[in-house]
Image: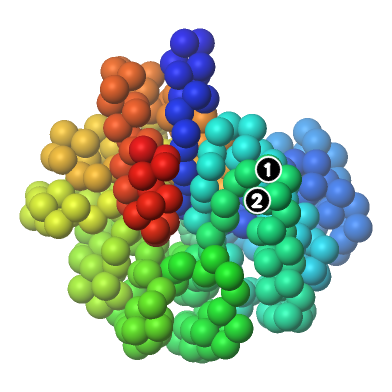
Amino acid sequence: ASTRAFVRALPKVELHVHLVGSADVDTVLALARRHPEAGVPTDRAELERFYAFRDFDHFLAVYWAVQSMIRGRDDVRALVTGLAARLAGQNVRYAEVTVTPYNHLLDGVPGDELLTGLTEGRAEALADHGVELAWCFDIPGEKGVVAGRETLVFALRDRPDGLVSFGLGGPEVGVGRAQFAPFFTAAREAGLHSVPHAGETTGPATIWSALHDLGAERVGHGTSCTADPRLLEHLAGHRVPLEVCPTSNVRTRQVRSLAEHPVRRMLDHGVVVTLNTDDPPMFGTTLEDEYVAVADALGLLPAEVAGLARNAVEASFLPGGRKAELL
Ligand code: HPA
Ligand code: ZN
């Protein structure tokens, strides 16, 4: 109980949370009643079973079903303001939120409605909840280079306020990182930061590729880095932060339990670890829960827990002055 109080009081930032995956249960149930064709349960207990994932691919199928119910500006804005309200309740002051424009465009959401929903929601998040949001636009890797090109074009054309980074998500198996190198190069030249997922469901070679081919400044997950001592040394030496999502990895069955999560070894090797939720209601977690769970599983001292929160502030793409306010 005292750990939770300590964690709640810490000013926190979140660096890895997907907008669609942040939809709370009531929102998803309401959407499911409006869109029965999506195949998402309309009943609370059934939705809980729907969120019991057999493996990572099953998780993605569920995620895409929820995503398909987002149809326009008001849906997008509601996701953003709902997320902001829940972040504010945990003393999360700033978040970098991943949005996958190409998938929403394929689902028929007009691009201008997506942008308006994000921008209006972001303004409301700040005004009503005091939470500052930034955006990461990411490529759905399974859709190949066409998705890379379209995501880049969409990101650079109207460049919404708060867009800070460019990412790559979806499955890793059979989806090489290197094919997306040209889009990451162009995004970085335009001033966006590089934050691909890597090493969530595949080995250390994917993380090396994210670093070398995509210029990754942080790595989404990076779970498998502990399998390669040279990579651990590289990440620690170059201070490349990892966006670790412990409960996500357990719930998608990439890791057996929190106790067995490689976060312990990452920390022991001096890697800059940040804690994140990925898709909080889908994984039955909150950012506060992640800090409490890791503190308990690893037996961390309060100063070490505070150090993790500080890592996230420092690893964020906030301007230096804003970082100082949160440290
Ligand atoms: N990895 C890849 N794609 C995703 C994830 C994730 O953790 N969450 C939502 N889309
Ligand atoms: Zn993710």
Badge 2 element: helix
Nearest to the observer: residue 234 or residue 15:
15
Does residue 99 show up?
A: yes
Nearest to the observer: residue 268 or residue 115:
115
| Quadrant that contains the C terminus | top left
Image disc number at residue 324: none
Badge 1 element: helix
- The type of residue carrying mark 2 is Leu
Q: Residue at x 86, y 49 (%)?
A: 30
- The type of residue carrying mark 1 is His
Q: Residue at x 33, y 74 (%)?
A: 177
Residue, disc 2: 126
Nearest to the observer: residue 86 or residue 167:
86
Estimate the x, y position of residue 146 in percent, counting from the top left.
Answer: 51, 88
Q: Residue at x 50, y 56 (%)?
A: 96
In this rendering, position of residue 44 left or right of residue 20? right
Does residue 168 show up?
A: no
